[in-house]
Amino acid sequence: MKVRVNTDLCQGHNRCYALAPELFDIDDYGSAFAIGDGTVPPELEEKAKLARDNCPEFAVELEK
């Protein structure tokens, strides 16, 4: 699984970062982005789904 943040949709609420700091970081403007290439280790898949489900802008996307 991979995670990514659609930067066109991200409004900087940073719920993804609050819920899964192992998968996301924040740039100097407050927008979130996936760490590395976005690969989600199996043990963090539930956190990735939680981050996706809690994004008010639907900016967090998961790929299988």
Image (tube, rainbow, N blue to C red):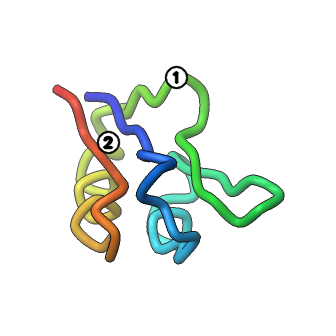
In the rendered image, which quarter contains the N terminus? top left
**What is the x, y in percent for residue 63?**
22, 30
Task: Look at the picture and state if 57 lies above or below 32.
Answer: below
The local secondary structure at tag 1 comes to loop
Foreground residue, 35 or 60?
A: 60
Q: Amino acid at mark 2?
A: Glu
Query: Going 53% across and 77% down the picture, which residue do you hit?
Result: 13
**Left-right relation of 5 to 46:** right
Q: Earlier in the sequence, mark 1 or mark 2?
A: 1
Within 10 Å of disc 1 (Cα), the crowding (few <14, some 14-19, many 20+) is: few
The image quarter containing residue 54 is bottom left
x 16%, y 26%: residue: 64
**Three-letter code, disc 1:** Asp
Task: In the displayed orientation, state which residue is furthest to the front.
Answer: 8
Mark 2 lies on residue: 43
Q: Badge 2, how many Cα within 10 Å: few under 14, some, many 20+?
A: few
Badge 2 marks a residue whose secondary structure is helix
Residue at the limit of the structure toward the left, as seen here:
64
Residue 51: percent from left, percent from top? 34, 63
Residue labelled with disc 1? 37
Identified at 75% across, 53% down, the residue is 27
Q: Nearer the viewer, residue 17 or 47?
A: 17
Q: Is residue 40 above or below residue 51?
A: above
